[in-house]
Image (tube, helix red, strand yellow):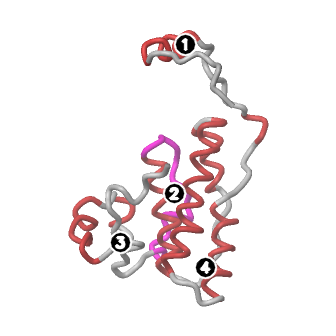
Amino acid sequence: MVFQGEVLSIGALLERAQAAPAHEPDRHVGVRHTAADNALRCAELVTAGESLDACWRFGVLQTLDDYTSTLRRGGAALAALVFTAVPASTGSDEVDAAFAALADHLAERDGWPVPGWALDPARRADGWYPAVPDTWRAEAERDSPRAFTQRGIFITARSLNRA
């Protein structure tokens, strides 16, 4: 099969994008997944003997993906609902602290109130570097967002970057 479409310049693509009507978020869909849902999955991983890095990926970063999707679809007020329900303990202080740090970080970044459960001082780790290799620990200590360092979690500036 041979391509038969039109190849546009970057300038033409930008013009089309600027001429297109503004995207209106679809608020009626609601929240599909929550931090509380993902914390339950992490508790299962911890019980099964999976690593805390697995909980970071499949729980905390999954929550970030769920939040980002909801934010794009319905704005900050809707996305904040991802963190409304209190996540039950996962069985790991580190992961519990990471859920709280993520909620605090996103609330500060996007301008919504930090949920009360995320301010619980018991949600704290003792120097956890989730998925951060030893060679990048100094960078994580220097660059970790306030919400994470305050809870004893150190991540690099790239740790929350998603594709």
Please give the residue where the numbered disc 4 appears in the rendered image.
90
Q: Which of marks 2 and 3 is nearer the N terminus?
A: 2
Query: Answer yes or no: do the residues labelled 1 and 4 have beta carbons within 8 Å?
Result: no
Q: Earlier in the sequence, mark 4 or mark 3?
A: 4
Q: Main secondary structure of the magenta part?
A: loop
What's the distance in space between the residues labelled 1 and 2, CA to CA? 36 Å
Task: Identify residue type, mark 2.
Answer: Ala
Q: Nearer the viewer, mark 1 or mark 2?
A: 1
User: Is 159 on the left or on the right of 102, as rendered?
Assistant: left
Determine whether the residue tagged by mark 1 lies in a helix, strand or loop.
Answer: helix
What's the distance in space between the residues labelled 4 and 3, CA to CA? 21 Å
User: Badge 3 local density, few (<14 within 10 Å), some, or many (20+)?
Assistant: some
Depth check: give the residue in front, 42 or 120.
Answer: 42
Residue 140 percent across, percent down from the top left:
28, 66
Give the vertical position of 2 relative to 100 (above or below).
above
Depth check: give the residue in front, 12 or 63.
Answer: 12
Task: Identify residue type, mark 4.
Answer: Thr
Residue 121 covered by magenta stretch: yes
Task: Identify residue type, mark 1.
Answer: Arg
Marking on residue 132:
3
The magenta span reads 109-123
Q: Nearer the viewer, mark 4 or mark 3?
A: 3
Marking on residue 16:
1
Measuring 59% from the left and 60% from the top, which residue is drawn there?
A: 62
Q: Which of marks 1 and 2 is nearer the N terminus?
A: 1
What's the distance in space between the residues labelled 1 and 3, CA to CA? 41 Å
Q: Earlier in the sequence, mark 2 or mark 4?
A: 4
Please give the residue where the numbered disc 2 appears in the rendered image.
103
Determine whether the residue tagged by mark 3 lies in a helix, strand or loop.
Answer: loop
Give the vertical position of 68 relative to 94 (above or below).
above
Locate the N terminus by quadrant.
top right
